[in-house]
């Protein structure tokens, strides 16, 4: 196999290209704002601007499929992307945000705003499962893997498959394919892009993380 290390980076023949887009910003949900046991706020004004910026950034890409989760903030972020490309979004429950048990919704926002020691411990030990009732780490890891493999399976030749998803999902998959610490990639920006290749041998390669240039215009 011939290799040219100076060529522009593109997905090799037989590989699939996946873009993970973090949803736009939203306001913290009300204390009683859970829907079906989940925090499900809509985008705020800033988030709508981030969604528009992501769509503009992807306007020149050959987008072959767009996936969202069942939560509104991903559907609303995906809306201008699918409109530009004439696609119908595909809802993929496997890519929904990690379930935070008793902290779901307003709880984690409240704890973050007051520097709660229990939240500090979760972040320090890099374990969501320290939260009472939270999703088990192995269950979360498996569903994220299954979901993103499905996104890659849908990528047509010469086109990218886009998944609009959540911070912890992006962090978890980046952890899996790089062998990093669990929360190494957790702090990704609303509206940011993370680009991945699934190689012909089904190895995954992280091409870029947390692209934000389109958000700063």
Image: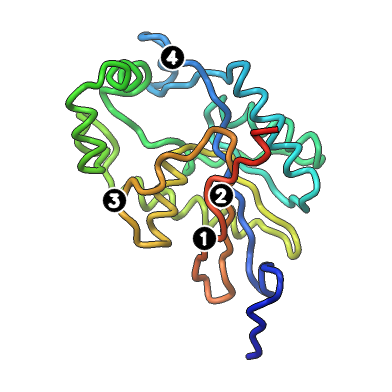
Who comes first in sequence, dot 2 or dot 1? Answer: 2
Per the model, the C-alpha gap separating discs 3 and 4 is 27 Å
Rendered image: mark on residue 194: 2
The colour style of the image is: rainbow
* Discs 2, 1 touching: Cβ within 8 Å: yes
Per the model, the C-alpha gap separating discs 4 and 2 is 26 Å
Provide residue 149's location: percent of width, then percent of height: 52, 58
Nearer to us of marks 4 and 1 is 1
Q: Residues within 10 Å of mark 4 (few under 14, many from 20)?
A: some
Q: Quadrant of residue 105?
A: top left
Provide residue 164's location: percent of width, then percent of height: 59, 39
Who comes first in sequence, dot 3 or dot 4? Answer: 4
Who comes first in sequence, dot 3 or dot 1? Answer: 3
The residue under the point 20% across, 29% down is 132
Horizontal side of 12 relative to 135 (left or right) equals right
Q: Residues within 10 Å of mark 1 (few under 14, many from 20)?
A: some
Horizontal side of 135 relative to 45 (left or right) equals left
Q: Residues within 10 Å of mark 2 (few under 14, many from 20)?
A: many
Horizontal side of 60 relative to 50 (left or right) equals right
Up/down of 193 relative to 35, above or below: below
The residue under the point 44% across, 16% down is 28
Determine which residue is flagged by label 4. Answer: 29
Rendered image: mark on residue 138: 3
Provide residue 103's location: percent of width, then percent of height: 29, 23
């Amino acid at each position: 196999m011939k290799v040219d290390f100076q060529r522009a980076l593109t997905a090799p023949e037989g590989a699939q290209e996946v873009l993970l887009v973090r949803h736009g910003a939203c306001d913290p949900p009300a204390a009683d704002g859970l829907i079906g046991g989940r925090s499900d706020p809509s985008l705020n004004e800033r988030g709508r601007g981030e969604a528009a910026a992501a769509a503009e950034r992807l306007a020149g890409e050959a987008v072959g499929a767009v996936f969202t989760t069942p939560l509104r903030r991903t559907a609303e972020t995906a809306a201008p992307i699918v409109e530009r490309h004439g696609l119908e979004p595909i809802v993929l429950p496997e890519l929904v945000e990690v379930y935070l048990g008793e902290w779901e919704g307003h709880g984690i926002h409240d704890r973050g705003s007051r520097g709660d020691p229990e939240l500090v411990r979760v972040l320090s030990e890099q374990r969501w499962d320290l939260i009472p009732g939270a999703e088990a780490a192995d269950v979360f890891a498996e569903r994220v893997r299954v979901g993103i493999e499905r996104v890659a399976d849908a990528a047509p030749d010469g086109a990218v498959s886009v998944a609009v998803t959540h911070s912890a999902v992006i962090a978890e998959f980046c952890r899996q394919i790089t062998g990093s610490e669990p929360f190494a990639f957790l702090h990704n920006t609303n509206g940011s892009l993370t680009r991945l290749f699934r190689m012909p041998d089904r190895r995954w390669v992280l091409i870029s993380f947390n692209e934000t240039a389109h958000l700063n215009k």
